[in-house]
Amino acid sequence: MAASGPPTSVVPFYDLSALHRQIRPELDAAYRDVLDGGQLILGPRLAQFEQAFARYCDVRECVGVANGLDALQLILEALGIGQGDDVLVPGCTFIATWLAVTRVGATPVPVDVHPLSYNMDPAKVRDAVTPRTRAIIAVHLYGQPADMTALRSLADEYGLRLIEDAAQAHGARWAGRRVGGGGHAAAFSFYPGKNLGALGDGGAVTTNDPELAESVRRLRNYGAQVKYQHERVGANSRLDELQAAFLDVKLPHLDRWNARRAEIAEQYSHALASLGLTLPWVAPEAEPVWHLYVVRHPERDRVRAALTSAGIETSVHYPRNPGDQVAYAHLPIDRTRLPVAGSLPHELLSLPMSPVMTDDQVTLVIRALQAVLR
């Protein structure tokens, strides 16, 4: 008899197909419009989405690019950051934040994260600044906005550029202001699983600086503003017409989807409060969009295995910090200065979170956790 496989999931971690079924006619119409229009790169649908997303983020400029990593890298290049420069990054984040720094020739310098928000701890920034420091990248991890008030103050004090990595925070707010306009520039990812995701890959840069936006536009298009006239060593990093059209369809639904995520987060937080889990903490100034609902437990692997047996899909964001990856083994990282970031990979667990989750599915997750932890 063949060995039985893992149980069929009764609650998927994220059901993209169900999300797209809600708006399938709109997506089909967008596809036909691009197909019939004939222009597939740098056309009217991209311009339309860039304008719409800039309005949504309450910024002057949006530049569509190929993905979130490129968005970060092109910001750094446009700001003239490169060889010999240091950029402060969170010790706990997805590796793309660090890769963008490395790809321009600069050095990522990790800063420990806040013990409750898991975002860069402003109290640790001052000790990390040196004469080589040129910028701070504030990551809005899991859809929880970073402390932009404190980080902007520190950036201004030291004459540093403040860049937002908003790849997980479409629509989040800090002190009433949407992320994307609180620093010198922001990078967004439209990877399919994001709160605002394409049907492929994509990204964008937002800023209130027209000169910076124009520089990014040249850099994304082989360094050229006019065809065959290359002013800089650029890249091929353009958000294509089809993905821009799909994103333009999804954008009007984003706030509704984020509101549903918030409802699910509230149900989780209410029901799981007495189970010995460390639940997500929300700062008074923050309005998160719950890209992920991440709990913390010292026996994370045991809890996760039990949930898997119950048909509950979970994930770990992230099982290894960037500074512990082989790619960065050459960096002289002082891990004694990263106690919080160092402890997180072994304890964090991401629960199912999706705007198409039903209340019954949320209840199944809660009951499974109660069975494991009580």
Image (cartoon, rainbow, N blue to C red):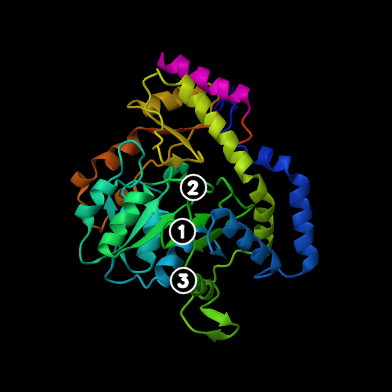
Name the kind of residue labelled 1 in the image: Ala
**Residue 48 visible at all:** yes
**Residue 326 visible at all:** no
Who is closer to the viewer here, 185 or 118?
Answer: 185
Say whether residue 46 is left or right of residue 366.
right
Who is closer to the viewer here, 211 or 167?
Answer: 211
Q: Position of residue 294 (x, y in %)?
A: 43, 34
Q: Residue at x 61, y 54 (%)?
A: 200
Mark 3 packing: few (<14 Cα in 10 Å), some, or many (20+)? many
Examine the rendered structure and indicate whether residue 165 appears above or below residue 221: above
Q: Which residue is mark 1?
A: 186
* Tags 3 and 1 touching, CB below 8 Å: no
Say whether residue 19 is left or right of residue 182.
right
Q: What is the number of the mark on residue 168?
A: 2
Say whether residue 178 is left or right of residue 355.
left
Please tell me whether mark 2 or mark 1 is closer to you in this view.
1
Q: Residue at x 41, y 59 (%)?
A: 183
What is the C-alpha distance between the residues marked 2 and 1?
A: 12 Å
Residue 32 position by quadrant? bottom right
Q: Residue furthest front?
A: 176
Q: Main secondary structure of the magenta part?
A: helix
Q: Residue at x 66, y 69 (%)?
A: 41
Name the kind of residue labelled 2 in the image: Gln
Boundaries of the magenta span = 358-374
What is the C-alpha distance between the residues marked 3 and 1?
A: 11 Å
Q: Answer whether residue 26 is magenta in the image.
A: no
Mark 2 packing: few (<14 Cα in 10 Å), some, or many (20+)? many
Please tell me whether mark 3 or mark 2 is closer to you in this view.
3
Q: Which residue is mark 3?
A: 212
Q: Position of residue 291 (x, y in %)?
A: 51, 41
Name the kind of residue labelled 3 in the image: Leu
